[in-house]
Amino acid sequence: MGEIRKIRKVLKSKPTIEGAGVHLQRVFGFSEAPEFDPFLLLDDFRSEEPQDYYQGFPWHPHRGIETITYMLAGEVDHADSLGNQGVINPGEVQWMTAGSGIIHQEMPRGDADGRMGGFQLWANLPAAYKMMPPRYRDVRNSDIPEIVSEGGARVRVICGRAGDVQGPVQDVIIDPQYLDVRISADSQFTWDTPRGHTVFAYIIEGQGVFCHEREPFSYPLQGVNYFDMQREELPGNGTLVSFEDGDQVVVSTQEDALRFLLISGKPIREPVAWYGPIVMNTQAELRQAFDEIQKGTFIKSGSQPV
């Protein structure tokens, strides 16, 4: 039996506005990014109000990163400078490697009840791969395998390996694992994690006990008013739990079922120069990228969208 990871930090997502006026919850971003290497940002854009999201994310550039969009409800229309066009439906994933540069747009649409929602994760690229050719992967709902763990949890394997099951997204530089985990009430879930990798869980339904710690808010906490919170409260919807190093994550439930994203990746440990949608290693590379955007020479593969 391996060493169980301990809780390092608990974060509550915070409201912010991005794109052309999309209201979303930022789980972590620029200021917290060094703690989540190789990941840079996680946004939760679940909403039941069309006015919060209908303006979407019109044409914008990316370089030096990968963006991973996982949909739960509604749809997102996508188009990019590689000529890709399509729709991300509930249960589906878009894994886009910006590499040397891509320009794309993401326009959300709600379902019949106005619900739209999902998550976007940004993963950094090492310096040696910053300028790799961009690529785009559509992962359909039916292509994502689901396994049942020893404790009865249902685990969708988007990326990474679970026993003999390999997720559909492969050959990613940072060796990530991206899981959607559902645990029934009064159950326990134990999952092996690579030692040395960054690991965190983001709760999207229910409440749970992580690493046998029933007072997790005794740990460093961000985004919460202490006077508005009962200390006995367990981590719930919109809460991220990050872990110290170790071999396993253990999660248990009481009267509530629990659903969360479990994400891990190999740290890059390189300097980060980041402004807006561009993430490089030096300020000089950052200036070059924005200079190329101004000159119309940013795209190295594909063509400038009209």
Image (cartoon, rainbow, N blue to C red):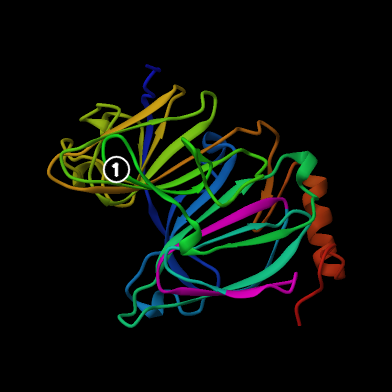
- Disc 1 is placed on an element classified as loop
Q: Position of residue 202 (x, y in %)?
A: 38, 46
Say which of 36 and 253 sits in front. Answer: 253
Q: Is residue 5 above or below residue 55?
A: above
Q: Is residue 77 magenta?
A: yes
Q: Which residue: 40% across, 66% down?
A: 117
Say which of 152 and 98 sits in front. Answer: 152
Report which quarter residue 296 is drawn in.
bottom right
Q: Residue furthest front?
A: 164
- Residue at which label 1 appears: 153
Count of labels in the image: 1
The answer to whether residue 70 is seen in the rendering is no
Within 10 Å of disc 1 (Cα), the crowding (few <14, some 14-19, many 20+) is some
Q: Is residue 124 above or below residue 107?
A: above
The answer to whether residue 249 is seen in the rendering is yes
Q: Position of residue 196 (x, y in %)?
A: 54, 24
Q: Position of residue 168 (x, y in %)?
A: 56, 52
Q: Which residue: 59% across, 75% down?
A: 86
Q: Position of residue 122 (x, y in %)?
A: 57, 51
Q: For the N terminus, give its image quadrant.
A: top left
Q: Is residue 190 magenta?
A: no
Magenta-highlighted residues: 64-86
Side of 45 where 172 appears, left or right: right
Q: Is residue 127 above or below residue 285?
A: above
Q: Which residue: 71% across, 68% down?
A: 103
Magenta: main secondary structure equals strand
Report which quarter residue 222 is drawn in.
top left
**Disc 1 residue type?**
Ala
Side of 155 where 95 appears, left or right: right
Q: For the C terminus, give its image quadrant.
A: bottom right
Q: Which residue: 51% across, 23% down?
A: 195
Side of 61 where 175 appears, left or right: left
